[in-house]
Image (cartoon, rainbow, N blue to C red):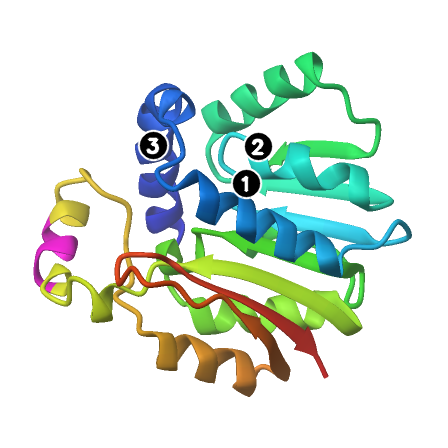
Amino acid sequence: MLRSLSVSARFWDRAAKRYAKTPVANKALYQKKLEVTQRYLKSDMYALEFGCGTGSTALVHAPFVKQYEAIDVSPKMIDICKQKLMDQPKANLNFSCLPFESLLSDEGSYDAIIAMSILHLIDVPEEVICKVSKLLKPGGVFVSSTACLEETIPWFKFIGPLGYAMRLLPKIQVLSKKKLELMLLNAGFEIDYQLETHSKKAAHFMVAIKV
């Protein structure tokens, strides 16, 4: 797992500047995800976002909660986040370079956890989802958007490992919506919302509540 995190960090470090300049592919869909997420956020909440990338989502959501922690494995991504935060100050928002797997927060520390476009980039997503469940208070909200490649490009499971071995790609899991939903249910969540889209290529967006 340590090697995977190291390879992933180097990959996203190399991609950081280009990623920051890349426009959102589907602005309407992205805006819809923001709006749905904010329906579940409250002013007294402690929120965590892992895999925060260049911080755009964190900057939008932070004003809706009491405290917002955002972490990412890539130092250069976090550098970009901190520069954005200087340009758009949010007193309750903090960016840190830290893998979610290394987070040492106590159980029940958060009211909301957000994971956008990250679960498919994690070695063992089942373990991460279980950790999310432990970190959330009862009734806590888990918002995720995940590429489910098994339903869009299933052949990626053959070329993905080659790209990873050559250190050209991070490790990418080939998930399906059903697998992802089962992981959440097994970790003690109830799925409260799923965003239906007409595009097979769209990531699967869900809001789950810790029972």
Q: Which amino acid does label 1 sit on?
A: Cys
Q: Earlier in the sequence, mark 3 or mark 2?
A: 3
Residue at 66 percent of width and 32 percent of height: 59
Establish if 15 lies above or below 184: above
Q: Which amino acid does label 3 sit on?
A: Arg
Give residue 12's quadrant in the image: top left
Q: Do the residues labelled 3 and 2 touch (CB within 8 Å)?
A: no
C-alpha span from label 3 to label 2? 18 Å
C-alpha span from label 2 to label 1? 5 Å
Secondary structure at badge 3 equals helix
C-alpha span from label 1 to label 3? 16 Å
Q: Quadrant of the C terminus?
A: bottom right
Q: How crowded is mark 2: few (under 14 residues within 10 Å), some or many (20 or more)?
A: many
Q: Are marks 2 and 1 in contact (CB under 8 Å)?
A: yes
Q: Which of marks 1 and 3 is nearer the N terminus?
A: 3
Q: In which quarter of the image is the N terminus?
A: bottom left
1 or 3: mark nearer the eye:
1
Residue 202: horizontal and vertical position, in percent?
34, 57
- According to the picture, the residue beneath numbered tag 1 turns out to be 52
Q: Which region shows up in magenta?
A: 158-162
Residue at 63 percent of width and 57 percent of height: 36
- According to the picture, the residue beneath numbered tag 3 turns out to be 10
- According to the picture, the residue beneath numbered tag 2 turns out to be 55
Residue 84: horizontal and vertical position, in percent?
61, 19
3 or 2: mark nearer the eye:
2
Residue 97: horizontal and vertical position, in percent?
57, 34
Q: Which amino acid does label 2 sit on?
A: Gly
